[in-house]
């Protein structure tokens, strides 16, 4: 059916309906033409224990809804980050002094403690914009752009997605493509991979800025199974190339027998007390993932279950199971318990430390996020309708990571120390959604 | 092998066309809580947190960069 024919039928129906109700047609048509606003806002607190990363974040997603399913979406995020992040160096039985990544100061780590780089302090502003437009009777196009800026990081991205409905709109097939270009500009310059940490002020081990390019492809299908059940499956491919190192991460250079970090004499202006190297990762990474999700409605309750398998050419495999159960309480409130289970294997170049005197590996990183660990999230959300029919919700979740060092990587005295402490974090978010 | 694959794809496709609902049976599926992404802000928040703390990202949507945290 052509759009004009459909519209003329709509107008005829509206005329008949309005005639019965005794109201005028133009008022109805005007109401349909009015744009609608759907505004989502939230305040997030994310806090890790042991004075590690703390984050406050303000987020908003503003959707302007036009007729014919055209939608403009604008997103804004402002993150404030403070705290400390593991540097990658191992704990020792004696204090150790380490140069900051910027090379212009040092920090001292007490004996027995995991070295944390306390230079971690940043503000991040991110914006996204997206236009959704129907094409013909059963297809849709989305075009988006994103940008974000941190003190030492800049991101630009573009994305496009095409989807088509089949089978009375019970089946939707989609294909998406995204490209991004990110620039890393750490203070003092990006460090030379596997170069030694030097005395304060010696920046000969630093280069300038470095960047990476990212390409993402997502192919998806969603299917309505019954009145109460909808499922979807996505295949994703992602490639990053360029500077993939974390400029803040280092490794300890250790004795082959004792496993203790090799001592070093610092210059008169101060410098590291032991030998450390900046990490080095391959300059290319391809990831593939399969994501499946099901939503099932059971007499007012909704079960949302998803599973993701990811594998990449750094030999990291991961499995993620996410379960949410929305449970109505009265007419306008609900409780939603949330459980998430995650497990990953370590990257092939993950190593706790570098052995002094042995041939230097081409790639090495002791970033705990590239290690072998399990994680679990448990949370509860409470949502309610306000008196003016808007939505508010509060959720509190606990996130825990528990990792292990691969067998054979623990040397001598390292066995007696906790080289991979658990990460415990709390996530608290208040959200307010209103429509105008 | 190709025949088995072709039959498999045909079976899946024919199963898809017999699955689903009529347009007037979409009352439940049209509810906010039955959308595949119910809360876009919460989904974006979670994606960002886990992108920063784990080696995996994406799946639900694009997994690209945009943060110096990883």
Image (spheres, coloured by chain):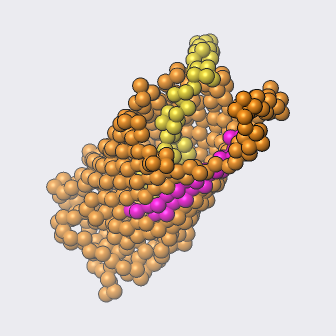
Chain colours: A orange, B yellow
Task: Kindly indicate the quadrant of the structure image that contains residue A297.
Answer: top left
Q: Is residue A75 magenta?
A: yes
Q: Is residue A5 magenta?
A: no
Residue A280 x, y percent position in the rendering: 44, 59
Q: Which residues are magenta?
A: A55-79
Which one is nearer the viewer's eye here, A327 or A407?
A327
Residue drawn at (64%, 26%) of the image: A169
Which residue reaches farthest bottom?
Answer: A268
Q: Is residue A370 visible?
A: no
Task: Kindly indicate the quadrant of the structure image that contains residue A146.
Answer: bottom right
The total of numbered circles placed on residues is 0
Which one is nearer the viewer's eye here, A19 or B64?
A19
A252 above or below A143? below
- Looking at the rendered image, the quarter that the N terminus of chain B falls into is top right
For residue A112, side relative to residue A167 (left or right):
left
Which one is nearer the viewer's eye here, A128 or A275?
A128
Task: Kindly indicate the quadrant of the structure image that contains residue A270.
Answer: bottom left
Residue drawn at (58%, 33%) of the image: A220
Residue A300 x, y percent position in the rendering: 42, 29
Residue drawn at (36%, 57%) of the image: A46
Residue B70 x, y percent position in the rendering: 45, 56
A198 above or below A430? below
Q: Is residue A148 visible?
A: yes
Which one is nearer the viewer's eye here, A59 or A108?
A59
A162 above or below A50? above
Residue B47 x, y percent position in the rendering: 46, 48
Residue drawn at (18%, 53%) of the image: A415
Which residue reaches farthest front?
Answer: A22
The secondary structure making up most of the magenta span is: strand
């Amino acid at each position: 059916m052509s759009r004009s024919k459909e519209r003329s039928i709509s107008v005829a129906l509206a005329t008949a309906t309005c005639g019965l109700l005794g109201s005028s047609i133009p008022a109805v048509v005007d109401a349909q033409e009015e744009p609608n606003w759907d505004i989502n806002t939230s305040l997030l607190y994310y806090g890790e224990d042991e004075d590690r990363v703390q984050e406050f974040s303000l987020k908003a997603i503003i959707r302007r809804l036009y007729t014919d399913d055209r939608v403009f979406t604008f997103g804004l995020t402002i993150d404030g980050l403070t705290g400390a992040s593991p540097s990658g160096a191992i704990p020792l039985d004696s204090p150790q002094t380490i140069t900051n990544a910027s090379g212009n100061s040092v920090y001292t780590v007490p004996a027995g403690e995991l070295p944390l780089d306390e230079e971690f302090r940043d503000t991040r502003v991110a914006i996204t914009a997206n236009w959704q437009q129907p094409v013909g009777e059963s297809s849709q196009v989305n075009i988006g752009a994103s940008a974000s800026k941190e003190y030492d990081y800049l991101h630009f991205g573009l994305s496009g997605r095409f989807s088509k409905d089949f089978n009375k709109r019970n089946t939707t097939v989609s294909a998406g493509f995204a490209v991004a270009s990110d620039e890393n500009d750490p203070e003092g310059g990006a460090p030379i991979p596997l170069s030694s940490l030097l005395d304060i002020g010696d920046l000969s081990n630093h280069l300038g800025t470095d960047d990476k390019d990212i390409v993402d492809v997502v192919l998806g299908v969603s299917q309505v199974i019954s009145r109460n059940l909808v499922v979807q499956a996505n295949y994703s491919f992602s490639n990053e190339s360029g500077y993939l190192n974390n400029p803040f991460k280092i490794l300890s250079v250790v004795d082959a027998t004792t496993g203790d970090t090799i001592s070093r004499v610092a210059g008169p202006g101060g410098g590291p007390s032991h030998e450390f190297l900046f990490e080095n990762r391959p300059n290319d990474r391809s990831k593939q993932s399969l994501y499946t999700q099901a939503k099932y409605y059971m007499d007012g309750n909704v079960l949302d279950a998803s599973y993701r398998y990811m594998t990449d050419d750094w030999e990291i495999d991961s499995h993620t199971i996410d379960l949410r159960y929305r449970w109505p309480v009265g007419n306008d409130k609900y409780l939603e318990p949330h459980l998430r289970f995650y497990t990953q294997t370590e990257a092939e170049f993950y190593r706790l430390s570098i052995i002094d005197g042995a041939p230097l590996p081409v790639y090495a990183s002791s970033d705990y996020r590239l290690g072998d660990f399990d994680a679990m999230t448990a949370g509860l959300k409470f949502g309610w309708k306000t008196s003016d029919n808007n939505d508010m919700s509060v959720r509190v979740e606990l996130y825990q990571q528990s990792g292990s060092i691969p067998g054979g990587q623990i040397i001598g005295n390292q066995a007696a120390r906790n080289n991979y402490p658990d990460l415990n974090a709390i996530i608290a978010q208040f959200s307010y959604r209103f429509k105008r | 092998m190709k025949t088995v694959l072709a039959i498999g794809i045909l079976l899946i496709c024919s199963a898809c066309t017999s699955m689903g609902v009529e347009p007037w049976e979409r009352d439940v599926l049209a509810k906010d809580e039955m959308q595949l992404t119910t809360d876009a802000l919460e989904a974006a928040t979670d994606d960002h947190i886990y992108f920063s703390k784990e080696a995996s990202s994406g799946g639900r949507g694009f997994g690209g960069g945009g943060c110096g945290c990883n």
